[in-house]
Image: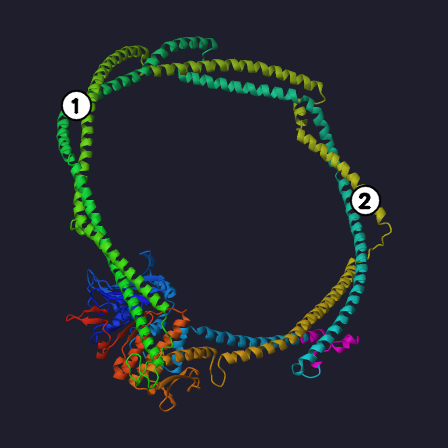
Amino acid sequence: MKLHRLELEGFGPFHARQVVDFDAFDGDGIFLIAGRTGAGKSSILDGVGFALYGEVPRYEGVAKRLRSDFCAPGDRTEVQLEFTVGDRRWRVTRSPEYERPKKSGTGFTTEGHRAIVEELVDGVWIGRAARPREAGELLGEVLGLSREQFQQVILLAQNRFAEFLLAGNDDRQALLRTLFGSRTYAQYEQALDQRRRDAETAVAGRLRELEVLVGEAERTVGSHGFGSDVAAGAGGTVGPEAAAGPVAQRPLADRLDELDRATERGTYRVTMLADAHDAAVLARDAAVAAHTELTQVHERAAERARARDGVAALDARSAEIDAARTDLARARRAEALRAPLQAADRAAAIVDAARTAEAAARTAWTQVDGSPTSTAAELDALIDEVTGHLAVWAAAAEQERALSAVRDERERCQVALAEAEQQAAELETERTALPARRRTIEEEHAAADRLAATGDDARAALAEAQARREAAGRVEALRDEVDAAQRAQLAAAGAAADAAVAATTLLRRRVQERAGALAGELVDGEPCAVCGSTAHPHPAEPSADAVTDDELAAADEARDRAHAAATTATEATSTLRAARAAAAALAGGLDVPAADEVLEAAAGRAAAAAQAAQRAAALGEQRSGIDRRSAELEEQIAALRTTRAALREQAATLTERITAATSAVQQARGEFATVALRVQHAQQRRAAAIALRDAIAALTAAAAAAADAAADRDQRVAASDFDDAAAAAAALRTDAERTELDDRVQAHTTALAVQKARLLELELALVDAPDPLPSREASAAAMTAARDQVDASVTAAAEAHQAVASLTALGRRARAAHGEIADLEAQRQLVAGLANAVAGRNERKMDLETFVLAAELEQIVTAANLRLDEMSSGRYRLAHTDALAARRGASGLGLEVVDAYTGQARPAQSLSGGETFLASLALALGLAQVVTDRAGGIRLDTLFIDEGFGSLDPETLDLAMRTLDELRQGGRTVGVISHVEAMKEQLPAQLLVVASRHGPSTVQQRAFDPA
C-alpha cells in the first residue's frame, strides 16, 4: 500500500484546504513532519486514519470533534486521500458528522457522515461506493487490514507506540486477537466445551431414560400380576412388594432379566384368556338364538289380536257403507238430468241480469236529458239526428284545435324575424370595426419585421459566444489534466533519478570490488601495483557479491528507459499546456462564469429575434384572417336580408288563416264555450240512447229463451223416477263426490277380506303355541348375561395382550438403551479430554487460542530482534516466555528483555525511556512484518512514526536513524513526527505544520532536491 496525496479542509487545526503530496518524498524515502507543539502534526495522521476508516487513533471514534473550530457555518469539512494497493489506484473522500450553527435562525443542525470511494480507470475516476457503509465494506476488502492492524503496521500513533511492549498478558492477548483474528480458536474452545457438556448430558439422559423404562415395565408387571405363580398356572398375581429386595437397588442387568421372565408369563396368560373367550362366545350365540325365537312367537300372538280387532271394527261400519252405496246409485241416475236443470237455471239468471241492465240504462238516459218513458222507436230517431249534427261539428272542432298551433307558428315567425334584425345589426357593427383593427395589426407587423431582420447577426453572435464558452470549459478541464501530467512528469523524473542513482551505485560497487580484488593480490613485503608501497596496513576487503557486466548493462538500460519515460512525460505536459493556452486564447480571456454571462446575453438576443419572426408571421396570418372575415360578413348580411323578407311574407299568410278559422269556430260553437264541449255533449246523448235501446232488446230476447228452457226441464223430469226438479237437483253429486263414495265402498269391502284372510293365517300358525306364552324378560336377561361374559373375556384378553405388548416394547427399548450407554460414556471421556486440553485446563493454563498466539508472538520477537540487535549494539534481545502468569492471567504470551551485559532476562518495564523506545520500535516493526505476511503479503510502501525520538541520546538516535534508513529500501517512504533538532538536520525532506497568529494551521512541503 502506498499513499500519494492527502487533502484536508476544515479538519482539526486546518481551516483552508491543505495538500500533502507524499509522492514528492519518494526521492529521499524518508521525511520529517515538524512543527511546534499543538500546530497539528498528528492531525496529518488523523486525516489518513479518518479517510480510510472513519475514525482516528487518538479520539477512538469521536468523529464529531474532527471539524475545525475555525469553520464558519457555510464551510465544509472534508478529507481526501489518494493511495495505491497493488496496481489499482483509489481515492476516498470523507466528511464526518458534526454539529454546526444553523445558517438561518438560532440553534444547531447536524451534517451527516458522508463517504465516496473512486477508482482511477484509464485516467478517469469511476465511483465505486457512495455511502459510509458501502465505503467501509469496499475499503476493508481493498486494504486487507482492520483499523487496529493499520495503526500497528502503518500508522504508529502517538501514545500507543510502546503499548504492545509494555502490555500485560491479557491486554497483549486482546491486541493479538484483534490483529490475527484468532477469535475462531476461542470459538473452537467454546464449541468443544459445549460438546463435552452435551456428551455428559447425553449419558445422564440415557441413564434416566433407562431407569424410566425399567420402572415403567416393573409397574406393568405388578399391576397385571405377571408373577411367578402365573407361570405355574395358579392364576394369581404377585405385586411389586413381593419382589426380592428394593427394585432400585438391584443391578439393571438383573432387573432386565426379570422383565424377560415376566414377559413369558404374560404371554401364557394371554393364551389362557383367549380360550375362555371362545367358550363365552358359544354360550352367547345359543342364548341369542333362543331369545330370538321366543320374540317371534310373542310378535305373532300380538298380531293375531290386532287382526281380530280389525275384523270387528270393519263389521261395525257395514250400515254406514250401505247408505253410501244408495247415495251413489241415486247420484248416477240424476246425472242424466243435470244439463236441462242447469240450462233452465242459466236462462232465469240471464233474464234477471237483462232486467237490471235495462233499468240502469234508462236511468242514465234520463240523467243526460231524455224522457224516462222513451220507446225504442223514439230512441232510433234521436240517434240518427244527433249523428248528423256530429259530422258537421267535428270539422269545426278540428279547426278549433289547429287554431292554437297556427297562432304559435306566427309567434315563432315574428321572433325569428326580430332575431334576424338583431343579428344583421351586430354583423354590421363588426364589419364597421374591421378597418381600424387591420391598421393596428399592420403597424405591429412592421415593428416585428424590423426586429426579426436582426436574427442573422444575433445567431452569429450566439455561435461565437458558444465557442468561447466551450473553450473556457476546455481550459477548466485541461487544468486537471495538466496537473496530472505534471505529477506524472515529476514521478517519471524521480524514477529516472532513482535509475541513475542505481546505475551509479552499481558502478561505485564495481570500483570498490576492483580495489578488493587488487588487495587480494598483495603480498607482504612486495610493492603495491597501484601505489608502490611495500606496507599494506588497511587492505580493502574483497566483495562476496560481485557486480557483473550484465548487471551494469541492465542498470544502464533501465536508466535509459527511465530517462526516455521522463522525456515523454515532459513532452506530454508541454502538449497539454499548449492546448490549454490555445483554448484560453479562443476563450478571449473569459473564465467559465464570464463566458456563461456572454453566452446567456447572446442567447437572449437570438431568442428575441426568433420570437419576433414568429410574431410577424402570426400578425400576417391575423391580417389575412381580417380580410377573410370582412368577406364573410358581406355574405352573411346579404343572406339575412333574404331571410327577413321571407319571414315577413310567412307572418302575413298565417294571420289570414287565423281570421278564417276564428269565424267558422264561432258559428259551430253555439251556446257552448267551445266546439269540443258541444261535440262531447252530443256524443254523451247519443251513447246513452244507444245503450237504452240495446238493453230493451236484450231483455225481450232473454225472457223468451227462459220460457223455452223451463218447458224442456219440466218435460224431462216428468219422464224420470224423481218427484220433481228439486228432488233431482238434491240427488246430484260432483265427480269428486261420486269418486269418494265409490272408493269408500270398495276400500271397506277389500279391507274386510284381507283382515279375515290374515286372521285365519295367524290362527293356524299359533295352533301349537303354549298358553300362556313364556316370559320374554327372563330370556333377555339370560342373553344379556351371556353377552356380558363375552365382553369381560374380551376386555381381559385385550388388557393382557396390551400389557404383554407394552412390556415387550419397554424391554426392547431398555435393552437398546443399556447397550448405548457404554458407547456414550466412551465418547464422553474422549470429548472431555480434548475439551479440557483446548480450554487450557493444564499446568500452564494455556488454551488453544493462546497457544496459536504464542506461536505468532515468537515470530514477531524473531523479526523484532533482527533490528533491536543492531539498534542496541548487540546488548538487548527480546525473548518470548510461556511462564505461568500470576492471578489467573493468560499464560504463554509473556515478553522479557535479555541483557547481554548481565546474561539475565528482565521485564520490559525496567528499560529506560530511550531503551523502551528502541525496543518498542523494533517490536512494532516486527509486528508490522508478521501482520503484513498474515494479511496476504501486502506490500507496505508508506510508514509513519509519531514521536518518541526525543528520549534517545545522539549515538542511539543515530542507530535508530540507520534502522529507519533501512526501512526505505525497496521504494518505501517513511514519515517521522519529531521535535528533535538533530533529526531536522539529518532529514532535509520535511513537511512543516505552521500555526498562524490567528489560529488555523497551514502545511508547507519541502521535498528533497538531489541537485
**Is residue 160 among the parts visible in the rendering?**
no
Taking the spot 20% from the left edge, 28% from the top edge, the residue there is 621
In the picture of the structure, the residue carrying the numbered disc 1 is 431
Q: Quadrant of residue 716?
A: top right
Q: Is residue 795 left or right of residue 511?
A: right
Q: Quadrant of residue 831?
A: bottom right
**Is residue 643 among the parts visible in the rendering?**
yes
Q: The N terminus appears in which quarter of the rendering?
A: bottom left
In the picture of the structure, the residue carrying the numbered disc 2 is 759
Counting other residues with Cα less than 10 Å from the Cα at mark 2, is it few (<14), some (14-19), or many (20 or more)? some
Residue 428 in the image, given as x and y percentages of width and height: 17, 22
Residue 591 in the image, given as x and y percentages of width and height: 18, 52
Is 79 above or below relative to 892?
A: above
Residue 718 in the image, given as x and y percentages of width and height: 69, 18
Between 157 and 479, the one nearer to me in the picture: 479
Residue 407 in the image, given as x and y percentages of width and height: 27, 17
Between 675 and 151, the one nearer to me in the picture: 151
Q: What residue range appears in magenta?
A: 218-242
